[in-house]
Image (cartoon, rainbow, N blue to C red):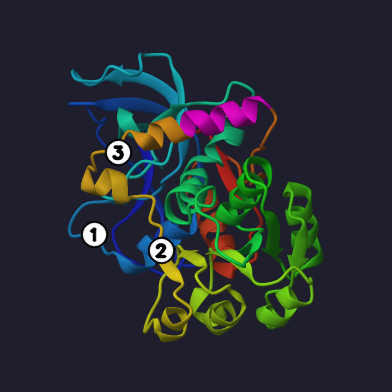
Amino acid sequence: MRAVAYRESLAIAEPESLVDVELPDPEPKGRDLLVAVKAVSVNPVDTKVRRRVSPEGGWKVLGWDAAGTVVATGPEATLFKSGDAVFYAGSIDRPGTNSELHLVDERIVGHKPASLSFAEAAALPLTSITAWEGLFDRLDVKGKPVPGAAPAILVIGGAGGVGSIAVQLARRLTSLTVIATASRPETREWVTALGAHHVVDHSRPLAAEVAALGLGAPAFVFSTTNTMTHLPEIEALIAPQGRFVLIDDLTGFDFSPLLRKSVSVHGEWMYTRPVYQTADMAEQGVLLNAVARLVDEGTIRTTLTEVFGTIDAANLRRAHALIESGTARGKIVLEGF
C-alpha cells in the first residue's frame, strides 16, 4: 500500500522529513477494522511527533484523523461491516492514517456523517473528541454551577481546530455565554460565524479584555494553545472555584495562584481511552456518532477550511509547515492517493 512516512526527525523544509513509501498491507485482528482511507486531516500532534520522535528502525506513519470505508473486520469486531463509511482519530500508539489502508479499534470509530463528503468528515474526529471530552467530561459544563461566577466559557484559540468545535458545542449544546479569542480579522470573523457571543484579542492582556465585556469572571476556561503564555491572565480572570481545562504542553506549571482560587485544573488528552484501554473506551465511538447526528441535523458544521490535494509527501509537508506557522484556521484536509 502507498503511505507517507519518515525515518528521522527533521525540519519540515527538509525533503526527507516526510516521504512517499510502499508498505505491506495490514491485517485486522481482534476488534480491528481495516479501513480504506479516503481523506485525512492534519493536527498539531502530527507536527509534534514528527519533530520529537525518531523511529527505531523502519518507517513511522503519522496521521490521526481519517474518513474512509471499512474493507475488512477482525474476528471479534461486531459494530461495523465491510462497506460502512466511517470517521475516527485512531490511537497515537499505533501506525497513523497517512496510508491507503489503516487498522483501528472499532470502539473508537463512528459512522461518517451522511451529509458530509469524506474530506469534510475527516476534519472532525480528533478535534471533536478533544472538544467534547474537554467540555463535558473534564469541565462538566452541564454539571454543578460555579457559585457567583458568570455562566460563561472562555475558549483560548477559538479559531484553531479544537477551538472551532468547542465554540460550536458550547454555543449549541449549553446556555453558556461563549467568549472566544482571535487576533486577526479573518479569525475573528470565523469564530463569530461559528457562534461565539464575544471575541477578545489574545495578543492583548486577556484579563482586561474579558473584564471589559462586563459579564463578570467566567466559570470556565478551555485553553487550546499557548497556555503557558496566557497562564497569568487565566489565573487573574477565572472565577474562584472555576474549572480550567488545557490540552497543550506545559513546562514548569505553578498551581499556586489557581490553588488559592480553588480552581480545578483538568488535562484533556483524547488518546487516554485508546492508549490505556479504559473501561469506557467505547464512549469515543458513541461520541463520534453523536457528533455525526449533530452535523446531519445542521446543529454544528465541519471545520474544513482548505483541501491541500492528494495524500502525498509534498502536500503533507505543506500542511505541516502551515500548522507550524501558527496561522492555520480550522482544519486542513488531504483527499485520495
The residue lying toward the viewer, choosing from 241 and 72, is 241
Query: Dot 3, how many residues are within 10 Å of its Cα: few (below 14), some (14-19), or many (20+)?
Result: some
Q: Residue at horizontal 66%, vertical 56%?
A: 329
Residue 334 placement: quadrant: top right
Q: Secondary structure at mark 3?
A: loop
Location of the N terminus by quadrant is top left
The alpha-carbon separation of the residues under discs 2 and 3 comes to 19 Å
Query: Dot 1, how many residues are within 10 Å of its Cα: few (below 14), some (14-19), or many (20+)?
Result: some
Q: Residue at horizontal 59%, vertical 82%?
A: 236
Q: Which of pointers 1 and 3 lies earlier in the amino acid sequence?
A: 1
Q: Residue at horizontal 58%, vertical 72%?
A: 239
Residues tagged 2 and 3 counted as in contact (Cβ below 8 A): no
Count of residue discs? 3
Label 1 sits on residue: 55
Q: Secondary structure at mark 2?
A: strand
Q: Amino acid at mark 1?
A: Pro
Q: Which of pointers 2 and 1 lies earlier in the amino acid sequence?
A: 1
Q: Is residue 331 above or below residue 12?
A: above
For the magenta stretch, what is the residue range? 288-297
Label 2 sits on residue: 266
Residue 71 rendering spot, x and y as whole percentages: 35, 18
